[in-house]
Amino acid sequence: MADWQSGPLAISAVPGAGKSTGMAAAAAIAIARQYERSAESGSSLRRQLVVVTFTRSAAANIKAKIRKYLRDDLSLPQTGFFVYTLHGLALNIASRHPDLSGLQLEYVTLITPTQSHRFIRTAVEQWIANNPERYLRLLEGHQFDGEETERLRRQSVLRTEVLPELANTVIHEAKSSGISQELLQEWSQQTTDEYAILSVAAGLYEQYQKLMRSRDFIDYDDMILAALQVLKNHSARRIEQSQVFAVFEDEAQDSSPLQTQLLEILASNSEEDTETRRRSDAGTTRITPHSSLLTPNSPLPTPHSPLPTPHSAVNLVRVGDPNQAINSTFTPADPIYFRQFCEQCDRIQRLATMDRAGRSTRIIIEAANFALQWINNQWSATNPQSPITSPQSPFDNRQVPFRLQTIRPVDAGDPQTNANPAPVGRGLELYTPQDIHHTVELLSQRAIELFGEDPTKNSAAILVRENRQGRWLAEALAPVCKEHNITLYDVGERDRRSHVPQEILALLQFCDRPHSPDYLKAALEALVQRQLIPTQDLNALASLPEEFLYPSPLAASQPEPVQKAAHLCRSLLRARLELPLYQLISFLALTLNYDQAELATADKLAERVNQQIASNSSMRSMLSALSEIVSSERFEPVETEDSEERYTRRGQLTIITMHKAKGLDWDYVFIPFLHENLIPGRFWVPPQSQFLGDFTLSEVARAQIRAALHGESTIPDVKQAWELAKQLKISEEYRLLYVAMTRAKLLLWMSAAQKAPFTWSKPENLQEQAPCPVFPALKRQFPQCVVTSEMIAK
């Protein structure tokens, strides 16, 4: 990266290699060279370096590093570059050309729609009204005897779960890839499934777009599309390109197709000095961006497309790690696009690998390398039609979980401080506790030993697969941490405060219209999430609200869980009648058993809403104000410090999900509850939607769309698409475990209890659970790291 002068460059980096720091240093050097060129030509520094990354916190971090290198090491002004997130870059381009982008920022509202968003729910209802025959076909499922109660239950499942989930998945997948509703409809004609899933998805997509346009709302994908719309214009494209001498991208494995296309166009240097271009490119071939933007009815160039004909340089440096791609099952990101870029660069000898890492002790590196190789070998054994790629040809098979990329320790005398440090204890410790309670006992005992007499010396984290595990652990560990002066920080608890407006809205909507099945189910879901009522079949309760809330004397006796839920719902309705409107939000916050921080967030919310409706105090205006806050996501707790610093403080035991841990590291990392039902997990169909078949519509549609985008000759049928979705899920779960393992510097503590909950919504129901398949393999490979009860007793 430091030697880069021009053209494309791909950097595939292992965890802990320092790719972000390296990119910041390379960016400073590239800016310095641009200053030299400007000085030689006697002009001011007109063209800038654009650096893009995945999150706002990462952007702030890289910006600070580049400024430091320019100031302290190069004695240059801290200018000549911009750092953006991908969406921030797109919005910047779109807002400078509102006549071309169609975005008048003073009139539009940015939203992040989810499955429960009112626009998606409304789109579902409108699609049902416009397509009664297709809706009835879905309602019939595989078999249907016409029984009224079952019909009502299926209606609830389709309207509140299946179709909203399908819409949410397909809208993100299609828009982020530039796929229009018309193209989806064309693709649907190539499939023969009984439900016409892609056609249904296209109809939902169309209704959603109409709603967004009618209300002047945009989402994050619209920002990318708007920027590309600007760059379709020749004059605007030349203006934007003339201000940029190169684009550097970090975390490139998380880019979607259109984001990649945006960067390639912006990095095209059509006005590059001819002589400089001739000298820098002598004897080489250029990679060029896709020469034309995606039109509504044209598919994207695919990873199987031949290299474009060279006609202009692309000054684009992309840094990433395909083995740390952990977002593709819930975002449109797919590591296949970064692998495609690496493949193209490899053909022209512009691919480099950062394979040396000084973060972790050697035993942790060995464990991570072994896990990667073992998983790929297992994949090869179970998928004989997909041979594992060789180091000489690492791109032949893009569906294997990992690129063969071994982490290597740094050389002796490496300048970084404490590179590949000495391990604490064994460096890797593998436990098999009796159950989850024994797990807490062992984990807390080890944490007390590690923090020792000076708790402020080291940092530690417990990485969990899902937030419910984190919540249970926080409650179990709180007394021990308090006794030994260890600060316990539950990241999930902090994040849950952002859900306060949504939970309050759900309960208020129910209080306003208790006979609405949708509102009743949303309220029940909030109560289950807060563990105030037992987990149960909410569709059955919501299908007949009157019978649930006020059963007649002749009705069958309600089971105890149903009685508890009905009693709590009736108490909410009574409060609605007895309390003044301005006290309702505070009452609901107490009912939801919020902690002190959540109560403060609720009070802030109540003050905001009451101010907003002061001139028209009514339930309708309160719901309208709350809906706007929830849908626009403008109500967030104010953060006073950097999130990375908050998560990695010394003397603190942080409970955090594996997804959030990406990009962070700690001295000691604990990974408990390594069970097969979570990693790689079971791809299952929720019981309430099994009437449709042994698959989910959303995952089938996602797999069919990606197959088309990846250049497959045919769109897979339902059975094939479901198998592809399973493979995607398994690969990503294993990459998630790899990311978790490589967060540790001095000690990696891993455990798989013999007994654990089948579902963490009911942690008290313990049963025998098989370990994650990698765990026994690690125990066989590293027997010296297995810790038994006898060893602990000694």
Image: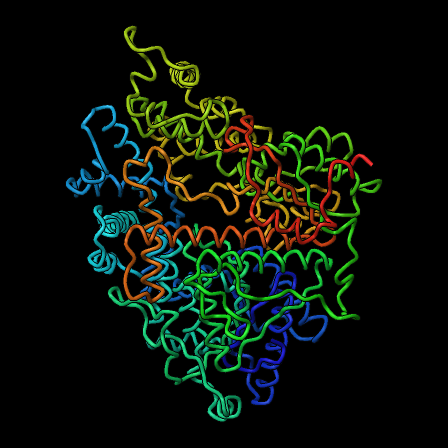
- 558 vs 743: above or below: above
Q: Quadrant of residue 632?
A: top left
Query: For this rendering, which residue is in front, 502 or 581?
Result: 502
Q: Is residue 579 visible?
A: no
Q: Residue at x 40, y 41 (%)?
A: 684
Query: For this rendering, which residue is in front, 473 or 239?
Result: 473
- 169 vs 136: above or below: below
790 on left or right of 407: right
25 on left or right of 696: right
Q: Quadrant of residue 581?
A: top left
Q: Residue at x 39, y 50 (%)?
A: 110
647 on left or right of 708: right
- 532 vs 609: above or below: above
> In x, y percent, where is residue 192?
21, 53
Q: Is residue 162 visible?
A: yes
State the quadrant of the N terminus.
bottom right
778 on left or right of 721: right
> In x, y percent, where is residue 71?
69, 70
- 135 vs 5: above or below: above
> In x, y percent, where is residue 198?
25, 52
Query: For this rendering, which residue is in front, 597 or 370?
Result: 370
Considering every residue shown, the one lying at the far top of the view is: 553
Q: Residue at x 73, y 47 (%)?
A: 459
State the quadrant of the C terminus.
top right
> In x, y percent, where is residue 152?
24, 27
Query: For this rendering, which residue is in front, 84 or 487?
Result: 487
